[in-house]
Amino acid sequence: MEPPTATKSKAERTRNVCILAHVDHGKTTLADCLIATNGIIPSRSVARLRYMDSLEQEQERGITMKSSIISLLYNRKECSEQYVVNLIDSPGHIDFSSEVSAAVRLSDGAIVVVDAVEGVSPQTVAVLRQAWRESVTPVLLINKVDRLILELRLNEHVYFAPARGNVVFASALDGWGFRLDDFAGLLAKRLGCSERILSRALWGDYFYAAKEKKVYRGASVKGRKPLFVQLVLENLWTVYDTFVTNRDADKISKMCASLDIRLGPRDLKSGADPHSALAAFSAQWLPVARAVLEAVVARCPSPRQLSTDKVNRLLTIGGVEGSPESAGLSCLRQHFLACSPDGPLVAFASKMMAVPAGCIVEPAPAGLTSAPPPEASATSAAELEQRRLEARRQWEAMRATKAAAVDANGESAAEASASNTDNDSSPSVYVAFCRIYSGIVRPGDRLFLLSPRHRPDRLPPGLAELTPDALDAEKRLSDSGLRHASVCTIGRVLLMRGRDFESVPGAGAGAIVGVEGLADRVIKTATLSATLACPAFSDMASEAAPIIRVAVECVNPADQSRLLAGLRLLERHDPGAEVLLEDTGENVVCSSGEVHLAKCLSDLRQCYAKVEFTTSPIVVPFRETLATDEALAEAAAAAADDPDADTDDADEAPPEELLSQLDIGESGGKDDPEVLDACRGLVCCRMQARDADRHLALTVRAVPLSAGAIRLLENHADALRRRPTAAGAADTALLALRDGLRSELLALDSAATSDAAAASVELGRLADCSVLAAGPRRDPCNLLLLGPSARLPDGTLAAPLLPTNTTNSTPASAVSSHLWQAIINGFQWTCQQGPLCREPLRGVAFVLLDVCEVSTAGDERYPELTVSAGQLMSHASKTFGKAFLCHANRRLMLAAFTVDVQCRS
């Protein structure tokens, strides 16, 4: 086997795959099975060692909290070739979905594990969605089939629906697994059938006629057992009945003799552990590792088989597919598709990780070079085989040392392992998990680190051919106008082996390796490139946003600087963590859930800051919203059915009284918004424009959005965030959003009450409005609309957010550009901090009904003052806030979890 350096001739025998599943569906046990085939751990330690879970918290909780990578060998018997399988074990807990995003971005294939009893669970759907977004080829593994036999005690007639050939049935705990081809190969000669025909007939409504030795269609019509039940499931049920349910040593001996399987005397004893004996039997009969790795090699693409869709998604200028591209980018696209080691180096770092310096082995064997010649493949394979045996000897020596420590001091092996794994006294090294898409990376290489704002189509003249080695200092970048790229130097290149890392001289296209030297340069993810023609890769989507938060404070004030530095490292290196500085001066850590929060605080205390600190109680953020009439009617009906429900109406006070209680900012000022019609929620604000004797009157109305409209905005959040600024760059996602929103707004107009309907006739229907903006920017679920009859100042061009069927060619004046930017910024600020309790808004649309110029010459209320852009934004924000407060259906929303409770009996 070659090291994971994947030259052009070796990339075809490389597979980059991740394991995806819901929590507790058996990912880590499956990973142990695959690792045991390489001799790194003994097969009897599978499911107990949890080799990829190296953190103490992972061992204590029994769940995976981070993505880990290990390179494995697989010898394929069909063609006598060796394959490199870069296996990524990812978490299944919803709190760590950002780690799943990091794993699928580096992978070409995925092993999707599903519990045979629990079935497709919520996180199964979530990880499948993430895999689909990254164009990852899936292989289905139905795990824990043994639970159907031992726990539910089903019979073999309750069988699975037909599926494609990329399905593996397995029990990672008992060590067996198979595809249809495996059983077809075992039974074809005995039944006298063609292996190809038998493999195709094992799925579906077929049955086997023993007398004719033929396979016929129509098992259900003729009352016969389907072939899958007859040949596969009945054999499995017989094995479990013989080994576990009604253990019979004589039958076990006969079964082993018929299948030419040899078991040790310990496994044949009557008092032996039945599952241990079954695992030893399965390892020779239907080993799960062989079935899974064969499915990976046969079904998952190699790095040289990247799909065009995936390459186009990665190499999009400004995040918009179909944008015009340069000749350099077109050439780079071809290098991606060919996985060329001769092309310019391009790599993507999906996450950063702190590892103890003692876990890095230095140096690598001399034969493991970054680009070995073809004739050196046999030597490299032998060396890696020797290294694999050495790793097993080291593991056995460590196990013996721990056993001696237990005898001497009474210390448990788990405690000893934890102390060796999480050694706080050892310095930490920050490693970036990188996938090489083109070229070869070596220690000491100088590369461009591209920020998300890097646009190769906007490079200053003469910079497109610039190379990192041509720059003497980073100052040249900013002096030349290139402000969204920097130069970094690669440290060591590391081969990842689960808990350990090995330094290698380099890595080629198609490899997944660790890279040092980027600790202070990468914020969560990074695009590394030897050419400025490469755009920054598109963002990774996460299924879980940070939802809970705590404030942290040093016990010793003298450690404040170390705590702040640790918080910066935590935010840079944890894909799902955020660190905020509140207006009160508090440092707040945001996470996806309580389990993720516990890991963040532990990493901060033990790895990043290494100081003692206190935390505030957990705070779950609210959302401010306006309820629709339909939602209120449903709530009233539910309250009427519940005699214990609190039916007090919190909104009995008229809007004017509420506004006096919940006023925004400074009340009574000359530029404060004025309530024109509280019943219809009309608020007007006068903002000073370019001249001292002219003001702009802004009239706003707030309305609720339907649940369908909110879902549309959430589903198209990526498209809204990457909205193109270049004219003509149409996005099909935005076109679909426009059509869907129009349908939802039409439904809102139709379902409005009589009073609201009268207001809609006078003020204009929502469906006829233009969409100007969506906010807040990170979670765009609110809209800023421009009313159909809104008056605009002369020369004003309101650029719509979503594509429209008509275009306005009138150029925007300096005044209107200044005004629109202030209005949009004020809208975004209000969406981020609502007027009720400074929480983000959700499901609210603000309609601009009028934007007109008002002459104020000679009016003492409006003195001649120069108003800054910040003041204009503040006035607009106050206007939107008061329009929200004028609505009668103000509500607060609290996050809630949907929980499925499952019991084993």
Image: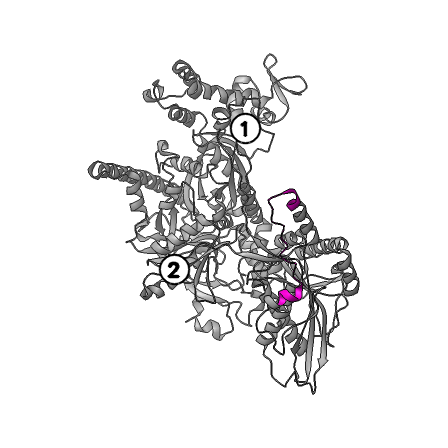
Give the x, y percent position of residue 566: 38, 60
Q: Indicate left or right for 252 with 230 as reference.
A: left
**What is the CA distance from the residue labelled 2 to the residue labelled 1?**
47 Å
Q: Indicate left or right for 346 with 762 as reference.
A: left
Magenta span: 638-659
Residue drawn 56% across the image and 72% down it: 461
Is disc 1 placed on a helix, strand or loop?
Answer: helix
User: Above or below — where is 469 with respect to 384?
Assistant: below
Would you identify the image quadrant in which residue 797 lies? bottom right
Q: Earlier in the sequence, mark 2 or mark 1?
A: 1
Crowding around mark 1 (Cα neighbors within 10 Å: few <14, some 14 to 19, many 20+) is many
Taking depth in this image into account, of 897 and 603 the one nearest to the observer is: 897
Q: Indicate left or right for 178 with 380 as reference.
A: right
Would you identify the image quadrant in which residue 853 lies? bottom right
Give the x, y percent position of residue 747: 74, 53
Disc number at residue 159?
none
> Is residue 7 something that shows in the picture?
no
Is residue 597 magenta-colored?
A: no
Disc number at residue 180?
1
Is residue 642 magenta-colored?
A: yes
Taking depth in this image into account, of 831 and 49 the one nearest to the observer is: 831
Amino acid on which disc 1 is placed: Leu
Residue underneath mark 2 = 517
Amino acid on which disc 2 is placed: Gly
Residue at the bottom extreme, as displayed: 858
Is disc 2 placed on a helix, strand or loop?
Answer: loop
